[in-house]
Image: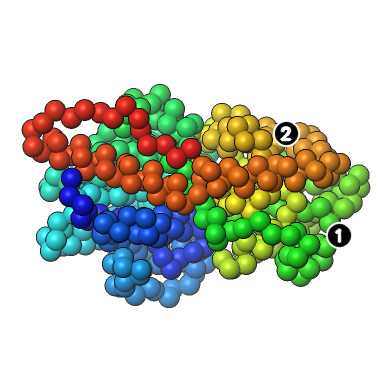
Amino acid sequence: MSTDLRICIINEFFWPDNTGGTGTVLSELVQALREQFPQIQIDVITSRNRYRSASEGDSALLPAQETWNGVRIQRVNCAVATGKKAVARLIANTQFMAGALLALMRRHRQKPYNMVLVGTAPPTLAVAAKLFRAVTGVPYLYVVYDLDPDRAIVMHVLSAKSPFAYVLRILQKQWLHSAGCVVVLGRCMREYLTRTYALPAHKIAVIPPGSDPNEIVPSVRENSDFRRKHGLSDNFVVCYSGNFGRYHNFDTMLDAAKDLQIELPQVRFVLVGGGAQNNHIRDRVANEKIDNVLVLPFVAREEYPDLLAAANVSLVTLEPGMEGLCVPSKFYSILASGRPVIASMSSVSEVARVLEEENCGIRVDTTDSSGLQNAIRRLVEDPKLGVRMGQNARMALERRFSTACVADAYWDAIQQVIFNSSAKTEGDPVEERDKTPVAS
């Protein structure tokens, strides 16, 4: 295989968008790949919109072209998809997909690519990669961050019996099987794809989002500016940070807070973020006088490590049925911060498996408010337990989930896709690798 490889990454959001989601995850991955594997030349095709500012009505557009750390970025004009109804989102997503495909074809004619990497933002983006493969023969690596339409069906956004869901499932199966390799974020997702879409296990690489151990480091809780700023210096802080999205259960969290506010007055629940359930959370806190809950907007990226350091324990949530369809990326940032985790989710989820393997937190069922209360009591009554779990979390991040580990696993997956494609082109028999690249 040539030591000079050219790949193109397509995703709706990318650097300098650092407000979370796939844009942030992919930006960190590209940076790590460039540092560890300089023989890879990486181009990125993305939109001119910012993820969170776009959803909040900010119309400021990013430059159409830019170079960042040796990565050529081309941004296409398209409508904002976030915050719209289903039909409007579909139109906006199709617009971006079409624009990205045209940009990809132009760039490929100038200098051919060895591989294309596409994710699931937007969900139909694999259409562009599949069409490009049909025309040029260039293979694609398909990164499944969130699996649709399955996710929409589980959350009752889409009926499983609707013709639209039926067609999307057929298309999703084609996208998965046409990929040179499919990357998923957890073992639960691999099991779901093999069971539901009959995708062979050897085509699936389990590679978690990971986190940069140099960007987020454990620090002394009492030194946190966030704790001082919000009057939390004497409190046991239970922190949730991220989207207040429809795929997360906040009522269990609020029920636990309500029941604990008299028994454990030193405990404060701090919810930092925004999204679809923002008004619901604030209304419950105000109407039910849940005084031990503090709801705050997102913090700037540079303040995020300090926010994580302010916590005694951090929460990660996932609705029942969502295991196998997504993995909360914030979990790995919490590991990096050296804090224990309480995971409100199924025992088969990837996060729950890591907690058990590494003894770095406590899992409770998603709707089990009493279980959540008991987990918090354990950590309040036994501070040394939280310290041990936090230390285990950091060691697990450094050993298994650092950005360097993630980049190594992606390098294996990239080589697998290009090698198998080259072998097929040359007419040689392709031997499937015995070991799929797995970062976890």
Q: Quadrant of residue 382?
A: top right
Which residue in the protein does label 1 denote? 234
Q: Residues within 10 Å of mark 2 (few under 14, many from 20)?
A: some
Query: Looking at this rendering, what residue extends furthest in the right direction?
Result: 262
In the rendered image, residue 356, in percent from the top left (x then y), is placed at 63, 31
Q: Amino acid at mark 2?
A: Asp
Q: Nearer the viewer, residue 124 or 336?
A: 336
Rendered residue at 21%/43% (across/down) = 418
The answer to whether residue 191 is visible is yes
Query: Looking at this rendering, what residue extends furthest in the left direction?
Result: 427
Can you say whether 58 is above or below 355 in the image? below
Mark 1–mark 2 distance (CA, rounded to whole Å): 27 Å
Rendered residue at 54%/35% (across/down) = 350
Q: Amino acid at mark 1?
A: Asp
In the rendered image, residue 66, in percent from the top left (x then y), is placed at 31, 73
In the rendered image, residue 421, in percent from the top left (x then y), is placed at 18, 39
User: What colour scheme has been applied to the protein in the rendered image?
Assistant: rainbow
Q: Nearer the viewer, residue 168 or 122?
A: 122
Badge 2 marks a residue whose secondary structure is loop
Q: Nearer the viewer, residue 428 or 54?
A: 428
Position of residue 325 in the picture relative to residue 339 (left or right): left
Q: Residues within 10 Å of mark 1 (few under 14, many from 20)?
A: few
Rendered residue at 30%/38% (across/down) = 181
Q: Nearer the viewer, mark 1 or mark 2?
A: 1
Q: Which mark is residue 328?
A: none
> Disc 1 or 2, which lies upstream in sequence?
1
Q: Nearer the viewer, residue 429 or 180?
A: 429
Q: Which mark is residue 368?
A: 2
In the rendered image, residue 170, in percent from the top left (x then y), is placed at 30, 33
Image quarter where the N terminus lies is top left
Badge 1 marks a residue whose secondary structure is loop
